[in-house]
Image: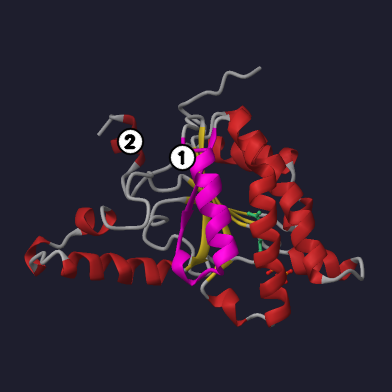
Amino acid sequence: MNSPDTATVARHVAIIMDGNGRWAKRRSLGRVLGHREGIVSLREVIKEAVRSGVRYLTVYAFSTENWGRPAKEVGALMGLMARQLVKEAPDLVSQGVRLRAIGGIDKLPQNVRASLARVEELTRGGQVLDFVLALSYGGRSEICDAVKKLLAKGVAPEDIDEATISANLYAPDIPDPDLVIRTSGEMRLSNFLLWQSAYSEIYFTETLWPDFRAAEFRLALDEYARRTRRFGLTDEQLTGDA
Ligand code: FPP
């Protein structure tokens, strides 16, 4: 039952949780209620990730572009995160989940930063799943920040390569995502993990994020398990027949 096949289980799954607003609109509800329902999906997906043997789960909770949304929605989302993270902490701890945050964390309101710091501390011992929240996150900003770090360290241009950039991203110890999921029918990466997703498998579904629960997540993992990853090589090279 709880025996994941490590050869086919995605080690790192990254999710663009899209469609909360549309889910709410279809029910004539305010957008924030869509985000609230999205938290229920997130809770279920974390549980299923743990059950399935996924080791890293990164979710796009707030992009650098999302700051441009109406102030009321931004405020409500920040409040939701500040409150909810602390409430979820005991459940995360009991599942062995470690919370981490990536992005422009210094740009977040003080209450969100305080909740993040508290829950990161409470879950620090979690060794089953790293749950990575991308907040005020942008893939291009992350690459710019990595280059700035290299310059600040005085690294010479000829020493800058893919490995040095990778080593200076927000969470350099986390492997690139094997699978990137985007819900709600949109087929874009929207500035999410641009560097890291170079060879990721991408899975799009029409399902809106608040409807994306454990069974839907399983479907995505099953589809991943059926894919052949080539990393630019031929079938013969991959099977060793070359
Ligand atoms: C995209 O849907 C969703 C977001 C911008 C926010 C996602 C955040 C959560 C699910 C809450 C996270 C909370 C915690 C505690 C981690 P959208 O609003 O863009 O939907 P639309 O495209 O239908 O308008």
Question: Vertical placement of 51 versus 58: above or below?
Answer: above
| Cα separation between marks 2 and 1 | 10 Å
Instruction: Magenta stretch: give its range.
Output: 97-124
Residue wearing tag 1 = 228
Q: Do we see residue 186 in this rendering? A: yes
Would residue 190 be found to the left or right of residue 169 on screen?
Answer: right
Residue sitting at x 79%, y 70%: 31
| Residue 102 in magenta stretch | yes
Q: Secondary structure at mark 2?
A: helix
In primary-sequence order, the first of circles 2 and 1 is: 1
Residue 142 in percent (x, y) is at 37, 66
Q: Is residue 180 above or below residue 46?
A: below
The x and y percentages for residue 51 are: 62, 28
Query: Disc 2 vs disc 1: Cβ atoms closer than 8 Å?
Result: yes
Q: What's the residue at 91%, 66% (across, down)?
A: 27
Residue 157 part of the magenta-drawn span: no
Secondary-structure class at tag 1: loop
- Residue at (44, 60) in percent of width and height: 193
| Residue in the foreground of this view, choosing between 37 and 104 | 104
Nearer to us in this view, 216 or 238: 216
> x%, y% of residue 144?
31, 72
Please, what is the three-letter code of the amino acid marked with disc 1? Thr
Is the N terminus in the top left, top right, bottom left or bottom right quadrant?
A: top right
